[in-house]
Amino acid sequence: MEPFVMTTTPTVEGRPISQYLGIVTGEAIVGANVFKDLFAGIRDIVGGRSGAYEEELERARTIAMEECRQAAIRRGANGVVGVDLDYEVIGAQGSMLMVAVSGTAVRLTG
């Protein structure tokens, strides 16, 4: 099975694009647990990193990237170029995090 490529660049070195298959996207919205918020606030006060938020951000990014990859595969692609990741805090009092991924599905040769 050939490897699937996702890149922020417009091309993949050594792999010419034989076909452009359209824009694909993936989104993930995750809620922040109230206890994680409390402990994150305490860490911020003492200058530490918020592991709880970092884990949620990583989880949302992974979900959105996989949705984008699956959308590309459904179009017959073996890659996505020009990947863009956007992050947004939404919901009442910023209680949710949205990660959106978009790019162009392509068929790579080589």
Image (spheres, rainbow, N blue to C red):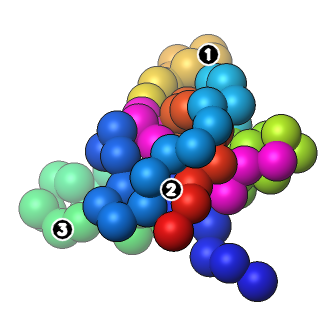
Give residue 106's quadrant in the image: top right
Ranked by sequence position, the earlier of labels 3 and 2 is 2
User: Can you tell which mark lies on residue 92?
Assistant: 1
Tell me: 41 left or right of 109.
left
Residue 74 place in picture, x, y as percent:
88, 45
Residue 27, position as x, y percentages in the image: 68, 35
Q: Is residue 65 visible?
A: no
Residue in the foreground of this view, choosing between 85 and 80: 80
x and y percent of residue 59 in the render?
A: 60, 61
Relative height, residue 22 to residue 14 (above, below): above
Q: Mark 3 points at which residue?
A: 48
Asked if residue 42 lies in the magenta stretch, the reply is no
Q: Distance between the residues labelled 3 and 1?
A: 26 Å
Q: Residue at horizontal 34%, vertical 38%?
A: 10
Secondary structure beneath dot 2 equals strand
Q: Which amino acid does label 3 sit on?
A: Gly
Mark closest to the chain's N terminus, 1 or 2: 2
| Spatial separation of the CA atoms under disc 1 and disc 2 | 33 Å
Q: Do the residues labelled 3 and 2 touch (CB within 8 Å)?
A: no
Front tag of 3 and 2: 2
